[in-house]
Image: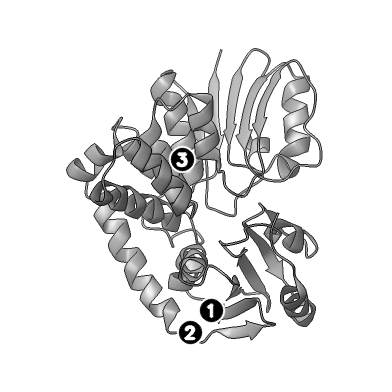
């Protein structure tokens, strides 16, 4: 029997898998990628009797591959927080799907494992911009303000590292996971490995460039900003969207990144005060995501005016 761990390469995906493997140690091949590499399940070479763990990847976008694996006799455990029309019913599938805007995959894994790797769950939650939820859990676990700040910086750094094209991130997600997995405690990682400081410094430099770009209004409830087609912008688009959401929690924010097809990639955040509706809006334009944060891989120049009008008219909240 072979085991495969398949996840998004951001903080939420990596920290969810890491929690599982700390509690259930076993040899497994990790299949992951950049933030927008969602349809990864078709790359899994599993056969009858093998086991696949899937974390933080839209089941909707991997449905055909999931059904193929199940039909071939592969056992699949699926943990995720993205929208799916209907979860398949199959004896070989164990699914924990929760699309509430105040949960992420790492917190779902924390629920599944009854808090046995809580600190890594917190890193994933902070990386997914669920700071208020993570702060409450961290305080309940007896972590002080300085420790919470360390875990938050690590989560934000791991999340930042997932964005961009080949060659843009500081370290490949597979290599980053290998370094994270050496430590049962993320605070020990921060003491013994420089990766946390490296990612934090790079993220801060890219954020400084992004904050210099002018914000534009979209109605009374949202703002948007356009970034150029540049490596720093590709790396920071997600972090910048989270940064804007945190600074103005009553507003929605869209970060548009110019692409080489003459259009834009879009990273959207619903207001933190009323987190909901981001995925529904992006699905109307061929994108997806979750209630509080969603995106569009390619928005054509012709569609941009309609997108901005929809952003201005959107209603937020679950």
Characterize the local packing of mark 1: few (<14), some (14-19) or many (20 or more) Cα atoms within 10 angstroms. many
Q: Residue 213 carries which label?
A: 2
Q: In this image, 2 relative to 279: left or right? A: left
Q: Would residue 183 appear left or right of 225 to someone viewing this image?
A: left
The residue closer to the viewer here, 139 or 244, is 139
Precedes in sequence: disc 3 or disc 1:
3
Distance Cα–Cα, label 3 vs label 2 = 31 Å
Q: Which mark is residue 14?
A: 3
Tell me which corner region of the image, top left, top right, bottom left or bottom right, holds residue 309: bottom right
Give the quarter of the figure containing the C terminus: bottom right
Q: Which residue sits at x=72%, y=45%?
A: 83
Label 3, secondary structure: give it: helix
Asked whether the beta carbons under mark 1 and mark 2 sit within 8 Å of each other, the answer is: yes
Percent of width and height locating residue 135: 39, 48
Give above or below for 143 relative to 256: above
**What residue is at 75 percent from the left and 15 percent from the top?**
91
Q: How far apart are marks 3 and 1 (CA)?
A: 27 Å
Residue 123 lies, in percent from the top left, at 39, 44
Mark 1: which secondary structure? strand
Q: Which mark is residue 227?
A: 1
Of marks 1 and 2, which one's residue comes earlier in the chain?
A: 2
């Amino acid at each position: 029997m072979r085991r495969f761990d398949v996840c998004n390469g951001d903080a939420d995906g990596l920290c969810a898998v890491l929690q599982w493997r700390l509690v259930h140690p076993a040899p497994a091949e990790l299949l992951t990628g950049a933030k927008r590499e969602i349809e990864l399940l078709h790359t899994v070479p599993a056969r009858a009797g093998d086991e696949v763990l899937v974390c933080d990847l839209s089941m909707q976008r991997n449905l055909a591959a999931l059904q193929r694996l199940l039909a071939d006799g592969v056992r699949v455990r699926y943990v995720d927080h993205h929208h799916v029309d209907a979860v398949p019913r199959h004896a070989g599938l164990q699914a924990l799907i929760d699309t509430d805007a105040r949960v992420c995959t790492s917190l779902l894994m924390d629920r599944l494992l009854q808090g046995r790797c809580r600190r890594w769950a917190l890193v994933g939650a902070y990386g997914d911009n669920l700071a208020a939820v993570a702060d409450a859990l961290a305080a309940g676990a007896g972590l002080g303000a300085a420790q919470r700040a360390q875990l938050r910086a690590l989560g934000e750094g791991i999340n930042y590292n997932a964005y961009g094209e080949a060659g843009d991130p500081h370290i490949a997600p597979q290599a980053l996971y290998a370094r994270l997995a050496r430590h049962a405690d993320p605070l020990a990682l921060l003491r013994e490995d420089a990766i946390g400081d490296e990612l934090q410094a790079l993220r801060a430099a890219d954020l400084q460039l992004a904050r210099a770009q002018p914000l534009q209004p979209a109605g009374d409830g949202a703002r948007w900003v356009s970034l150029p087609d540049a490596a720093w912008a590709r790396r920071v688009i997600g972090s910048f969207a989270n940064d804007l959401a945190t600074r103005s929690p009553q507003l929605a924010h869209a970060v548009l990144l110019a692409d080489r097809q003459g259009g834009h990639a879009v990273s959207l955040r619903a207001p933190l005060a009323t987190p909901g509706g981001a995925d529904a809006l992006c699905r109307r334009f061929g994108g997806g995501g979750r209630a509080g944060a969603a995106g569009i891989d390619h928005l054509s120049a012709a569609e941009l005016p309609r997108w901005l009008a929809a952003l201005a008219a959107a209603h937020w909240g679950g």
